[in-house]
Amino acid sequence: MENQKVFNMQFAKVYQLLIEKAERKGRTREEVDQITCWLTGYTQSQLNDSMMDTITYGDFFLNAPEPHPNRYLIKGKICNVRIEEIEDPLMKEVRYLDKLVDELAKGKTMDKILRQ
């Protein structure tokens, strides 16, 4: 039930919170956008359209055009839950983005964040 609540949240609202988190640590919206496009396969234009649409957070990930194959290299804990142990595939996608924005806010370089 808790997962469904997250999936039904409006994408634009959640995404704005991720941007604000990064900006508080001296990072930029452009970096958050780059991470999101890398992870999901959305273009910058598609990402911008999603911000103006009423798409839910769950649908944003369900409709991702080309999730990056290296996203499975994202490991670690987010909200005290180990990503590798998340069973719900959609929640795992959501937590991948959370983890990448956390890494950005902690000062990691884009090469490391994007698993290059």
Image (spheres, rainbow, N blue to C red):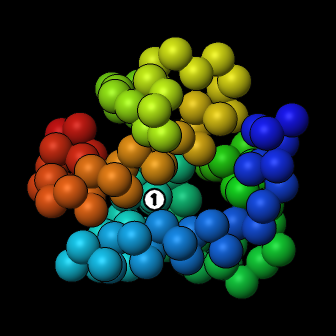
Task: Locate the C terminus and report the quarter of the image it occupies.
Answer: top left
Foreground residue among 80 and 74: 80
Residue 31 x %, y %: 31, 70
Residue 68 seen in this snapshot = no
Q: Taking 104 as reference, is 97 above or below it?
A: above
Task: Locate the N terminus and report the quarter of the image it occupies.
Answer: top right
As drawn, the residue found furthest toward the front would be 80
How would you rate the neighbour count of disc 1 (Cα within 10 Å): few for under 14, some for 14-19, many for 20 or more?
many
- Identify which residue is drawn at 82% across, 49% down: 5
- Identify which residue is drawn at 78% across, 78% down: 53
- Which image quadrant for residue 26? bottom left
Residue 95 x %, y %: 52, 40
Q: Is residue 106 left or right of residue 7?
A: left
Residue 25 seen in this snapshot = yes
Q: Taking 68 as reference, is 10 above or below it?
A: below
State the residue position of label 1: 37
